[in-house]
Image (cartoon, helix red, strand yellow):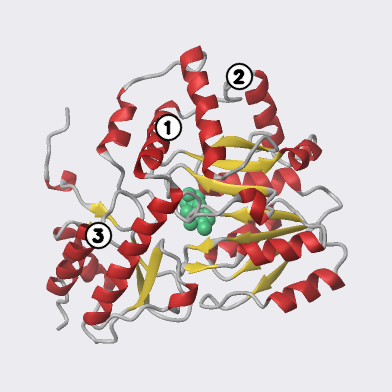
Amino acid sequence: MINNNSTDKPYILLTPGPLTTSSGVRSAMLKDWCTWDNEYNSLVQDMRKRVLNVAEAGDEYTMIPMQGSGTFSVEAVLTSVIGENENVLILSNGAYGDRMKTICNTAKISNSIYKIDQTETYNLDYLEELLKKNESITHLAVVHCETTSGILNPIKEIGLIAKKYNKIFIVDAMSSFGGIHFSIPEYQIDFLISSSNKCIQGVPGFGFIIAKKSELLKCEGKARSHSLDIFDQWKVMENGNGKWRFTSPTHVVRAFYQALLELEAEGGVKVRESRYKENQNTLVKGMDALGFKAIIPLEKQSPIITTFYAPKHPEYNFETFYSKLKEHGFVIYPGKLTKEESFRIGNIGEVYFEDIKTLISSVEKSMFWK
Ligand SMILES: *Cc1c(COP(=O)(O)O)cnc(C)c1O
């Protein structure tokens, strides 16, 4: 038994995941499960159905969980669905868009990129031109909430254009799925990726893909990786009635299942989204009153995570600010913007309006440079 000491002091994570989970989710992990056991595999099947409900997706879709962090699932999709003579146009306004390009380059998947500034969203007329001119493009991939900055990309409009030109539409909705309401069929998404430790509010350990079955069925034999082959993963799971192809992260799955029940008990995605929005509004107003400006304009800002300009004061440094806030029980996130010094504050997870209020007064007490 490890003694409680200062390093075990609890804090609220205001980060884009792993995030603060409920005690219900954490206690769901206290039992060990057998991966061959019917009870566990039925739970997996039920989990898959419930995720499809969150996505408002019917029988034409399926949910495929994949071991690893979220990036493994992004890589699983890109390497499983884009074949030898196909190529993908990647849209990027941040680190996660860029990461899709790195994945494709490493796997030698032919790709091109439409890259813009981290504080902007795409010019849809220009996107349409690109697709019109380049008939060799077969797939279009975009990040929904670009967690680098907190900007929200217009995936509904992008999906309309993708389908007008008959492209397979891939969306990294890692940090938005379950926290921002949308319907996968309505948005015409063929492959959506998210993970256990973001807005569903589970713990880290696996990612998942929501795939349009008719497109998934075309992926047999296409994969460039064995362990990340989403077609094979799906087929084994379907045939085994919920049994994973390789060792499944049992405790994480059980916690995720509990998190899904708690999402339903909260009132579903719309209610969760309004809680996140209230958190975000409270955050931006409170920070503004203390002199911190958000980088992303309000109309493009997601309710997930907010980037603030770092104070220009010569004595300011992120590490000290971070440590002071941690002493007050809050953990924030460093900035990831290329141009400006910044920091980020997330508001997803088991975090409420009152917590953000307390955060604001803690920020005020932590402004050591004043
Ligand atoms: C969190 C996140 C990922 C995955 O990151 P991992 O560290 O691999 O879990 C991918 N895309 C976006 C937009 C994210 O927010």
Q: Which mark is residue 257?
A: 1
Between 192 and 207, the one lying in front of the other is 192
* Residue 350 in view: yes
Percent position of residue 236, x then y? 66, 24
Ligand 1 under 8 Å from disc 2 Cβ: no
Regarding mark 2 in the picture, which secondary structure is present there?
Answer: loop
Percent position of residue 206, x then y? 49, 38
Q: Is residue 319 left or right of residue 45?
A: left
Q: Nearer the viewer, mark 3 or mark 1?
A: 3
Q: Which mark is residue 269?
A: none
Q: Is residue 142 above or below residue 54?
A: below
Q: Which residue is mark 3?
A: 353
Cβ–Cβ below 8 Å for labels 3 and 1?
no
Between 335 and 301, the one lying in front of the other is 301
Q: Earlier in the sequence, mark 3 or mark 1?
A: 1
Q: Is residue 324 above or below residue 1?
A: below
The amino acid sitting under disc 2 is Asn
Q: Which residue is mark 2?
A: 241
Q: Measure the alpha-carbon separation of dots 1 and 2.
A: 17 Å
Percent position of residue 355, x then y? 21, 58
Q: Is residue 362 left or right of residue 244?
A: left
